[in-house]
Amino acid sequence: MRKFFRFNERETNYQKETLAGITTFLSMAYILVVNPIILSQAGMDKGALFTATALSAIVGSLLIGLLANFPVGIAPSMGLNSFFTFSVVIGMGIEWQVALTGVFIAGIIFMILSLLKIREKIINVIPKDLKHAIAGGIGFFIAFIGLKNAGIVVGSEETFVSIGNLTSPTTALAAFGFVITLMMLVRGIRGGIFYGIVLTSIIGMIVGLVDVPNAMVGEVPSLEPTFGVVFQHLGDVMTPEVLAVIFTFLFVAFFDTAGALIAVASQAGIMKENKIPNAGRALLADSTSGVMGAIFGTSTTASFVESSAGVAVGGRTGFTSIVISVCFFIALFFSPVLGVITPEVTAPALIIVGALMATEVREIDWSRFEIVVPAFVTIIMMPLTFSVATGIALGFILYPFAMIAKREWKQVHPIMYSLGCLFIMYFVFL
């Protein structure tokens, strides 16, 4: 087992990997609660959605661990589940069964692109500076998510965002967790992020801010209402509206996953010569998870940026992903306990991990203006648009223009020009 996952090469062990897997699971366990809530508003069965969410995470995390040896958790994407419900089903009036079939077809296309190594080729030709910008931008993005979940940053009609009510009990709980976690990390306590989540949960239950589970074990809901529905509606997707939806699923999922893999590989120190090892296998695992998730009955899956929480406590191999998969399997039977993992409990971990990831910006060549602007736009637009894919797209549009103006257009790979044009068309027409 140690040899298969290359423990010695990546300077890790079972204890580090197990702790990393549990930490990542706790950081992304909210998806088991939130995904059914969002997708059920599209008319889908909430119980079946819970089971489908867990099963897709089990399959995806297991595959990426075994095939690619990556410390990444895969589960239904938060951005795409909202797009599925509010834009596609409610906004466009497309039945959820047809929309889910669109997710299935997008996953099949992803698998083909992965097998042909087209996705891997695209990721490998991204310039080094932009890769560091993507990793750093995701750091700012997930820190922003953490601040929002903690109630420290809130929406405002006058200024768009503003400082929240710091005297709110739940915000105070998140602040307590942040300080405790920070102190443990500064003291060099390995696993400080994990212990911070546990301590914050316990304190939250003691003071009544986190519900104490009234049971430990719950029945696994039936998958029957959603399982295999996609096969009944394959003939209903050949309309301009649904084809546009499929393209959007492709676009957002591709670059959400690419951004997450780049960020995790950079943080874990396993990126070599500006290339992600086993990127093709990682992408195949991700796309296969998307296909299986659609068959189970959930929206598009993606590699979770919260995986960085596990990397921060020592996760370096696919064994971390195996642990994540096992945790999701156990969660199927212990659903009542999931209420303990609230957004306020995991917020401190996201803020601190975001800070750690943001250090990637130091690797960007800030002396070259033609690099500075595309990199900066990539970074800043991720939190401002609440989308990793949008930040990447805008940076990729600006980069070729900047290099042409610098008369260094030959240094830009043709794929980057193609992507720039594709993103312009995406924003103009979709």
Image (spheres, helix red, strand yellow):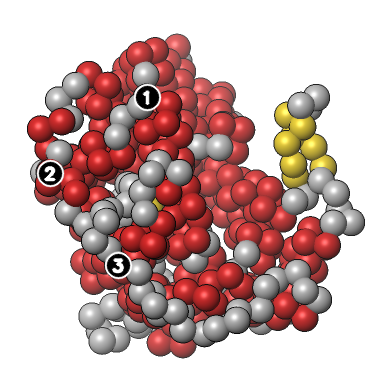
Give the vertical position of 430 relative to 143 (above or below).
above
Kind of residue sitting beneath label 3: Ser
Q: Residue furthest right?
A: 167
Q: Quadrant of the N terminus?
A: bottom left
Report the mark closest to the observer, 1 or 3. Answer: 3
Gap in angstroms between the C-alphas marked 3 and 2: 19 Å
Query: Horizontal placement of 160 versus 370: left or right?
Result: right
Question: Where residue 171 sits in the image (x, y, percent)?
Answer: 79, 58
Residue, x 68% and y 48% (percent of image)? 148
Quarter of the image where the C terminus is located = top left
Q: 158 or 193: which is nearer to us?
A: 158
> Marks 1/3: CA distance?
29 Å
| Residue type at numbered disc 1 | Met
Asked whether the viewer can see residue 89, the reply is: yes
Residue flagged by tag 2: what amino acid is it?
Answer: Gln
Rendered location of residue 205, percent (x, y): 72, 78
Looking at marks 3 and 2 on the same chain, the residue that comes earlier in the sequence is marked by 3
Which residue is labeled 2 in the image?
Answer: 232
Which is more toward the observer, 97 or 1?
97
- Callout 3 environment at 10 Å: few (<14), some (14 to 19), or many (20+)? some
**Location of mark 1 (residue):** 92
Question: First in sequence: mark 1 or mark 3?
Answer: 1
Residue occupying the point 72% across, 55% down: 150
Q: Is residue 288 left or right of residue 61?
A: left
Q: Quadrant of residue 188?
A: bottom right
* Labelled pair 1, 3 in contact (Cβ < 8 Å): no
Q: Which residue is mark 3?
A: 222
Q: Position of residue 252 (x, y in %)?
A: 37, 36
> The residue tagged with tag 2: helix, strand or loop?
helix
